[in-house]
Amino acid sequence: MFNFINNFFRSAEQQAVESSTSSDDGKQKKEQEEKKKEKKYLEQEEPDEVRIGGRPELTEEEIWALLRDYVNKLKASNADNEKVCNKLDKFYENFNMKRFMKNNPHMTHPDFYMVIYNETASIVD
């Protein structure tokens, strides 16, 4: 009988311990699942670039046409300064399209004007 009482209390203690650890296990499982979900969310690759209005990317032919128009407009606005016109002609002749496309991938119209302005600002000033 003494053994039965010891076993009875022991089993009650074990049950209490088991029930407390099982609830902790449930909390730990939920926390681990939440961490996994957060990790998946953080690991998802998102594009760093934001496209303005879904504008299409420019091709080489379009860039050449835009460059020609831009240089001609600058030449027209600086028609009285022959030195600037000569520099603009030289800039157009020496323009390296492959390097330009490599340095500025996925270029749209606004991007083009921003980059070309920065490249020609020193010539015009």
Image (spheres, rainbow, N blue to C red):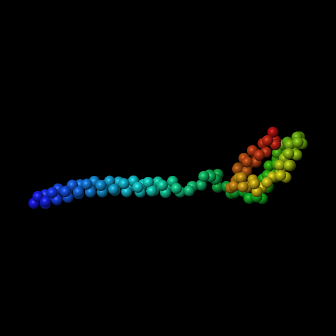
Residue at the (73%, 48%) spot, across then down? 115
In the figure, 106 relative to 118: above or below? below
> In the shown orientation, is residue 45 left or right of residue 101?
left
Residue lying at the far left in this picture: please name it.
1
Residue at the (42%, 54%) spot, across then down? 34
- Locate the N terminus and report the quarter of the image it occupies: bottom left
Residue at the (73%, 50%) spot, across then down? 112
> In the shown orientation, is residue 58 left or right of residue 11?
right
- Locate the C terminus and report the quarter of the image it occupies: top right
Quarter of the image for residue 25 reads: bottom left
Residue 124 locus on image (x, y percent): 81, 41
Residue 81 locus on image (x, y percent): 88, 40
Q: Is residue 88 visible?
A: yes
Q: Is residue 62 visible?
A: no
Residue at the (41%, 57%) spot, across then down? 33
Quarter of the image for residue 11 reads: bottom left
> In the shown orientation, is residue 4 left or right of residue 89?
left
Residue 103 locus on image (x, y percent): 71, 52
